[in-house]
Structure formats: structure tokens, C-alpha cells
Image (tube, helix red, strand yellow):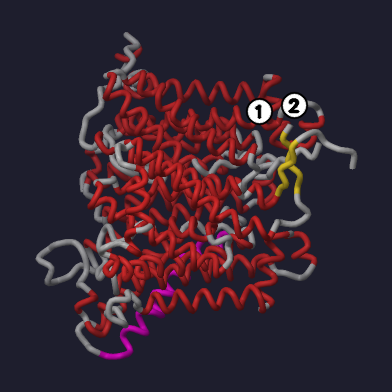
């Protein structure tokens, strides 16, 4: 008989080992999936995980790695704080869109003035946009006890509708010959978020992501708020007795994750994406959920997980062009990773015992 | 703007068609939640059902086989969730999200060769003279089989939960899994069965979208329908007839805004198309504002991990 025995506290060894184990299992299962699609599994896995860093065209892909990882890390750091406290913001995609729209709108309002203040103002507007969008589920949760999971998620579809409206209406490029989409911010010097060091892919978003990692680390380790977040996650009742205000915590966690998602959107729209267009958002807000879990909701873990997930994006694109692997395969692959991660998590919280139960 | 172009009879008839996918998914989720499991993967199961049903219907030429395949596909996918949460004791919220992300990916993958194809038409049931009745005939008696299946499911689930021993056991498991376990009920098996039922219903709902309502296959075509189904279960206060009301209310809003778009209202199209989501949020707020009422319907063990220590 196989028996599960609850550990008194999560095993720290397995906490570190399970993400690696999950990645290995996903590679095996992914290999089977790719084989079923008619690809050589080993070559497909190598194209996705090895070639972008060490292969022939690595000089191009390495720069892309940070560009893709930055928004994922930025969003996942915010989400992880809430997830730790049992506050589920899964509408980061919407906050990301609204942040991008607000930031871009501020930038476009100054066009074509070349003032140094434009970009900082855009950053602030992006963060505020994301923050306010996240405040909707937060206030509904604290005032009316409405489920924040459903509200934040439903607001993603509202944000997408607003995005389409902005791209076709108010923010459309007046010199764009009627095509949908705003002016390209990359060509507007004061608002452009360009590469800071040639060839590395480092832009302001990457720097913001690193700051966020450090900030979250200090917050969780050294600050009272971080203690309250961890306490609420482990025992909401004990937290209440300890004087934690649950409503404040909801506002803080949702607001911070919204602001960070908004920042990610702003850095994306002013840099890699360049403009507000109908299909501007590319699922970063949802992939960041996987990143947060893969990183064990720990800032350093999220940093590594974000880089790994960025690698699957880039490797997926490479596999698309060289092997003809469909884009959706990578999405399924990422979903699979989360499944395996949750499955092997069992080993962290439980001991697997073989044989019959002994006398205690 | 020309409001006279909107024909109320056709409006009500198309309301029923528009509501059916959400109704199917929501009634399945109701049973799942009554057993104490919160499956947030409805969206993923719906879209998987949509492509399974679509692919099989196109390949075989039979919509009926398509619907069966959709139910099987949805149930199979939901069992991944079932095994993870019930056997491997993972967090239900996180696993449900994973199911949605995975479902969106796998459906896009499966659906690659099916973009731009028209599925075989699902025939309307001919109810003879009933269908020829004025007004009532058009509204009630001129739909395809799935509309009636969805209504029958609502009645069936209601009767099952209220009047049968099985329903009582299911509710007991949802209210207190420890007590049910102590009484000797197989908590995990009962929950797995409920999860599979929910998956099958969500799959049917998805297939109704791709085979009847739209009808074609596009990536991400459920566009939040699964999440709205989850909201409707809350709206319904975990009661079967409430689910029917919620789904039809939502379907009504959807159809109305589409008609207003067609009639050329002076509101931007995007504002109209976001209205169903906004109204769902509004309804959620109203329903959950009264804490006592909101707590009354919800199964007490909802979302809690069950681990029998002995």
C-alpha cells in the first residue's frame, strides 16, 4: 500500500528540487507531444532549451531572453505576494493592458515635444493605470465580499475591448493612413524605451524587474508587511488575532501587483512592442502565473523561473521557424509545466510511505 | 438607429441559443461545486470540448458524434484536474488555472487544420404542429436537440440533488468531507465522478459554441464563457434553477447588445461588447454583498483539500 503522511512542515529539500523535477518531467512529456506532432523529440527539446543560449544564433537570442523575461518577472513578483496571502489576482493581463494604454496616452499627449520628463511621466501613468484597474476587484472584495478571482479575470475581457477601442479610435495614429494602431513610440525619442546597452536586450523594464525582485525579497524577509503576508497565507485566523487587517492586505497585494503589471505593460509598449495595437497583449499576464508558481512564490525563484519561461518563448519561436512547430505547442507545453509542478508538489508537503501503517 | 429592426420573437429565440453553452457549463460546475470542489478550469474544458466536437463532427460528418466526443474530451481533461487535486492533493485554485492555460494551448494545437472550415449543420428538431404555432412555436419549439438537453440537465440536476439518495451523499461530501468519510462514503471517488460530469458538461457547452452558435473554429473562441459560467454558479446561490435564470439573463444581455450593434446604436461597438462582462461583475457584486445569503448556498467544504489521515 502507498500511503501519504503529512509533513509537520514543508520539506526545504523538496521545495528546491521539485521545480527542477517538474521541468525534467515536462521535457519528457513535451518530447512525447512533439513526437506525436511528427518532430524528432530530442531535436525539438534542444532547439527550445539549448540552441537559443549556446547555438549558432545565440548572439541574437540571448538579448531577446531579457526582453521577454522582464515583463514576466515584473508581473510574477506582484502576483506572488498576493498568492502567498491567498489573494488571487489572475487578471494581470488586464492590468498590463491598461497600464500600457495609460502610459502610451501620456506619451502621445506630449508628442512631438522632446522633453526629458515625458518618459518618467509615462512610467508613473503606467503604474497608476495598472494600480487603478486592480483596485476594482480589490474594492469590490473589501466592500462587497465579491470573489476577486472572477472579477479580476472578467476585467481582462473588458480591458481587451478598451484596447481595441483605443487602437481604432482615440489613440490611432493620425498619420497612419487609417490603419489601426497608435504612433510608434520607438520613433518618438522622448518616450522610447530603447536598449540601454547594445546587444544585451537590457531596457528600463529589465532594470525595473531587478529592482522589483530585490524589493520583494527585502519586503518578505525584513518588513512587517511581508510577515503579515506570509502569516495570512499560512493561517488567516492566527493573522487576524495578530492584528493583521485583511482588507488592507487585499488592497496592498492587488494594488502592488496591478501597478507592477501596469509597469510591465508600459515598458513593453514603449519598447519591444512600440505601439498600442489590437493584438498588443501576448498572454504575459497569464504566463506570469506559471512563473510565480514555478519560482515557488519566492523572489529569487521567480527570477530564475522568468528566465526559463522566456527561454521557452524564444525557443518556441526558433522551433517554429526551423522545425515548423506550431506556436500553440509552446502554450500547451507551458500549461503542462504547471501541471507537473503542482503534481510533484505533493513531495514537498507529504511523505510517501510504502507498506502498512505501523503503530504510532 | 433603427430599433424596429429588432424582432422580439427572434430575440428571445436567439437568447436561448446564446445561453445554452454557458448553461451547460454552469450546470456541470454546479454539481462539481456541490461536491466541494472548485474547478476554475471551466474555460479550458469548454474550449477543449469545442475543438474535440468540431474535429469529430467535421471528420465523421455527424454533429451527434461530435457532441459525444466533446463530452468525452471535456471529461478526460477534467480528470487531469481530478487526479491532481484529489489524489495528489494539489491546490484547487492553482490547478484549475493550470487546466485553463493547458486547455487553451492544447485546443489551439488540435485545431490547427480546422480553421476556416464549416461544420456539418446540427439539425433542428421537428416538433410538427408545435413548431408551427405563432410566436411560441418559434421561441420554444424550433431549436436543436442540445437546447432541450441543456434544459433537461437542469431539471435532472435539480431533481438529483433534491430528491435522490445519491444527491444527498454528494451534498454531504460537499458540506463536510470528514463527516462523509467517517460515514464510509468514498469521498475521492464521488468527487472524481462529479468532476468528470462537470468536464463533460463544459465540453458539451464548448461544442455547442463551435458547432451551432458560431459555427466555426477559431482559437480562444470561448472568450471568457467558462469564467462567466463560474460567476453564474455564484449568482445562482448554488441552485439549479438559479443557474438557468443566470444563464438566460446573460444570454439576453449578449443577444441584446449584438442586436444593438447591428441596429447601429451611437455607442462604440467595443463598449457594447464589454457590457456582458460588466453586467456579470455587477450581478456578482449584488449577490455577494449580502454576506449571509452568499454564505448560505456555498458548500462548506468548497475548495478545501481532503486528506484522510487514516
Q: Which residue corresponds to the image point at 36% horizontal and 27% vertical from the top-left?
A: B53
Does B223 appear in magenta?
no
Q: Quadrant for residue A141, please give it.
A: bottom right
Please report the residue visible at 39 percent of the width from the left and 60 percent of the height from the top: A284
Q: Which residue is mark 2?
A: B185
Circle 2 crowding by C-alpha within 10 Å: few under 14, some 14–19, many from 20: some
Q: Is residue B284 left or right of residue A166?
A: right
Q: Quadrant of the C terminus of chain A?
A: top right
Q: Is residue B61 above or below residue A113?
A: above
What chain does mark 2 sit on? B
Residue A301 appears anywhere in the view: yes
Left or right placement of residue B263 versus residue A302 in this view = left
Residue in the picture at 45% in, 74% down? A209
Q: Please state the extent of the stretch shown in magenta in the rendering.
A: A115-141
Which residue occupies the foreground of this view, B297 or B257?
B297
Chain letter of the residue beneath label 1 in the structure image? B
User: Does the magenta stretch mainly form a helix, a strand or a loop?
Assistant: helix
Q: Are marks 1 and 2 in contact (CB under 8 Å)?
A: yes
Disc number placed over residue B190 in the picture, else none: 1
Image coords of residue B105 (percent x, y): 38, 44
Residue A303 lies, with reference to residue A202, above or below; the image says: above
Amino acid at each position: 500500500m502507498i500511503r501519504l503522511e503529512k509533513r509537520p512542515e514543508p520539506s526545504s529539500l523538496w521545495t528546491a528540487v521539485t521545480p527542477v523535477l517538474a521541468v525534467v518531467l515536462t521535457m519528457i512529456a513535451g518530447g512525447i507531444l512533439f513526437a506525436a506532432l511528427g518532430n524528432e523529440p530530442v531535436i525539438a527539446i534542444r532547439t527550445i532549451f539549448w540552441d537559443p543560449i549556446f547555438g549558432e544564433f545565440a548572439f541574437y537570442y540571448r538579448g531577446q531572453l531579457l526582453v521577454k523575461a522582464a515583463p514576466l518577472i515584473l508581473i510574477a513578483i506582484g502576483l506572488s505576494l498576493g498568492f502567498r496571502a491567498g489573494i488571487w489576482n489572475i487578471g494581470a493581463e488586464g492590468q498590463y493592458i491598461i497600464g500600457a494604454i495609460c502610459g502610451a496616452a501620456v506619451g502621445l499627449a506630449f508628442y512631438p515635444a522632446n522633453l526629458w520628463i515625458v518618459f518618467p511621466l509615462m512610467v508613473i501613468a503606467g503604474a497608476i493605470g495598472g494600480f487603478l484597474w486592480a483596485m476594482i476587484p480589490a474594492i469590490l472584495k473589501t466592500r462587497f465580499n465579491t470573489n476577486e478571482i472572477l472579477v479580476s479575470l472578467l476585467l481582462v475581457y473588458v480591458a481587451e475591448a478598451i484596447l481595441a477601442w483605443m487602437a481604432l479610435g482615440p489613440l490611432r495614429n493620425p498619420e497612419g493612413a487609417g490603419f489601426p494602431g497608435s504612433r510608434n513610440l520607438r520613433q518618438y525619442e522622448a518616450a522610447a524605451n530603447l536598449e540601454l546597452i547594445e546587444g544585451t536586450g537590457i531596457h528600463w523594464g529589465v532594470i525595473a524587474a531587478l529592482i522589483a525582485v530585490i524589493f520583494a525579497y527585502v519586503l518578505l524577509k525584513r518588513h512587517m508587511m511581508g510577515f503579515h503576508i506570509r502569516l495570512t497565507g499560512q493561517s488567516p485566523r492566527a493573522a487576524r488575532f495578530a492584528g493583521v487587517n485583511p482588507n488592507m492586505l487585499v488592497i496592498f497585494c492587488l494594488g502592488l501587483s496591478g501597478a507592477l503589471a501596469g509597469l510591465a505593460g508600459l515598458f513593453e509598449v514603449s519598447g519591444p512592442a512600440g505601439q498600442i495595437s489590437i493584438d498588443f497583449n501576448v498572454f504575459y499576464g497569464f504566463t506570469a502565473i506559471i512563473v510565480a508558481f514555478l519560482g515557488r512564490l519566492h523572489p529569487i525563484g521567480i527570477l530564475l523561473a522568468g528566465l526559463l519561461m522566456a527561454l521557452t518563448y524564444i525557443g518556441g519561436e526558433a522551433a517554429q521557424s526551423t522545425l515548423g512547430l506550431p506556436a500553440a505547442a509552446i502554450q500547451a507545453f507551458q500549461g503542462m509545466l504547471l501541471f507537473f509542478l503542482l503534481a510533484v508538489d505533493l513531495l514537498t508537503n507529504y511523505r510517501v510511505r510504502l507498506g502498512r501503517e505501523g503503530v504510532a | 438607429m433603427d430599433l424596429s429592426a429588432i424582432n422580439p420573437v427572434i430575440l428571445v429565440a436567439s437568447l436561448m441559443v446564446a445561453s445554452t453553452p454557458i448553461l451547460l457549463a454552469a450546470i456541470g460546475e454546479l454539481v462539481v461545486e456541490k461536491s466541494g470542489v472548485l474547478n476554475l478550469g471551466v474555460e479550458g474544458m469548454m474550449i477543449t470540448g469545442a475543438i474535440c466536437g468540431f474535429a469529430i463532427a467535421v471528420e465523421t460528418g455527424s454533429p451527434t458524434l461530435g457532441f459525444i466526443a466533446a463530452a468525452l474530451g471535456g471529461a478526460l481533461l477534467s480528470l487531469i484536474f481530478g487526479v491532481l487535486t484529489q489524489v495528489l492533493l494539489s491546490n484547487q485554485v492553482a490547478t484549475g488555472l493550470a487546466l485553463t492555460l493547458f486547455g487553451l494551448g492544447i485546443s489551439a494545437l488540435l485545431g490547427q487544420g480546422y480553421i476556416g472550415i464549416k461544420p456539418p449543420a446540427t439539425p433542428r428538431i421537428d416538433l410538427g404542429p408545435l413548431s408551427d404555432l405563432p410566436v411560441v412555436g418559434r421561441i420554444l419549439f424550433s431549436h436543436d436537440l442540445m437546447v432541450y438537453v441543456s434544459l433537461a440537465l437542469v431539471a435532472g440536476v435539480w431533481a438529483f440533488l433534491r430528491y435522490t439518495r445519491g444527491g444527498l451523499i454528494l451534498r454531504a461530501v460537499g458540506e463536510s468531507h470528514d463527516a462523509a468519510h467517517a460515514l464510509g462514503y468514498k469521498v475521492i471517488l464521488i468527487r472524481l465522478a462529479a468532476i468528470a460530469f462537470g468536464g463533460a458538461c463544459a465540453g458539451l457547452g464548448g461544442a455547442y459554441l463551435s458547432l451551432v452558435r458560431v459555427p466555426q473554429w477559431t482559437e480562444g473562441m470561448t472568450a471568457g464563457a467558462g469564467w462567466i459560467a463560474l460567476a453564474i454558479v455564484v449568482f445562482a446561490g448554488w441552485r439549479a434553477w438559479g443557474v438557468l435564470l443566470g444563464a438566460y439573463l446573460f444570454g439576453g444581455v449578449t443577444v441584446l447588445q449584438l442586436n444593438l450593434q447591428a441596429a447601429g446604436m451611437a455607442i462604440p461597438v467595443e463598449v457594447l461588447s464589454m457590457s456582458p462582462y460588466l453586467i456579470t461583475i455587477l450581478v456578482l457584486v449584488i449577490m455577494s454583498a449580502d454576506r449571509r445569503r452568499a454564505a448560505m448556498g456555498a458548500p462548506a467544504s468548497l475548495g478545501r483539500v481532503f486528506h484522510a489521515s487514516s
